[in-house]
Amino acid sequence: MDIATVAKELNLRLVSGSDRMKNNVTGGYTGDLLSDVMANSHGGDIWITRQVHQNIVAVATLKDHAGIILVNSCEPAKDTLEKAVQENVPILISNLTAFETTGKIYNLLNAANNR
C-alpha cells in the first residue's frame, strides 16, 4: 500500500514529499524516543510520532522510512520542514492521537495483506 492511499483513508494532510506519495508502506512504527525508533523500526515503515524537531527527518532518512506522520495536529518545526523538503521525506499530519492513527494504519495494512 502506498502513502497516498494511507493519506486518503486517514484524511492526512501532506506538508512535504509530495513526489514520494507512491512510497510503499510495508509496516509501521509508533514512538517518540529516537533511539528506540532507530533500534526497532524498519525500512518501509511509516513512522507515527509527536516529535516535530528536525532530527525526525534524519532518523527517517537513516532508516529508509516510507514517511512520517505527526499526530495530534502537530506541525513540524520550520527547520524540520525545510530539512524534509531538502531530503524529500514525506511528512503528513493527522488530527488523531497516536493510538488512533496506529490502529487505523494497522487495520489498513492488515486488510491489504489479506486480499
Image (cartoon, rainbow, N blue to C red):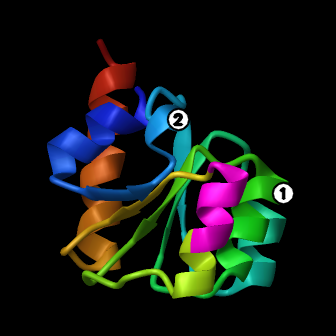
- In the rendered view, would you say 67 is above or below 22? below
For the residues marked 1 and 2, what is the alpha-carbon distance in whole angstroms? 16 Å
Q: Residue at (58%, 44%) from the top-left corner?
A: 66
Q: Position of residue 58 (x, y in %)?
A: 78, 68
The tally of labels here is: 2
Q: Residue at (53%, 29%) from the top-left corner?
A: 24
Tell which circle, 1 or 2, labels the residue nearer the N-terminal end.
Answer: 2
**Neighbours of disc 2 within 10 Å: few (<14), some (14-19), many (20+):** some
- In the rendered view, would you say 26 is above or below 28? above
Query: Which type of secondary structure does the marked residue at label 1 adopt?
Result: helix
Q: Which residue is mark 1?
A: 62
Query: Which type of secondary structure does the marked residue at label 2 adopt?
Result: helix
**Neighbours of disc 1 within 10 Å: few (<14), some (14-19), many (20+):** few
Q: Position of residue 61 (x, y in %)?
A: 76, 55
Q: Main secondary structure of the magenta part?
A: helix
Q: Are marks 1 and 2 in contact (CB under 8 Å)?
A: no
Q: Which residue is mark 2?
A: 20
Q: Residue at (31%, 74%) from the top-left corner?
A: 99
What residue span does the magenta drawing correspond to?
82-88
Q: Amino acid at mark 1?
A: Leu
Q: Is residue 98 visible?
A: yes
- In the rendered view, would you say 12 is above or below 25? below
Where on the picture, by quarter, is residue 69? bottom left
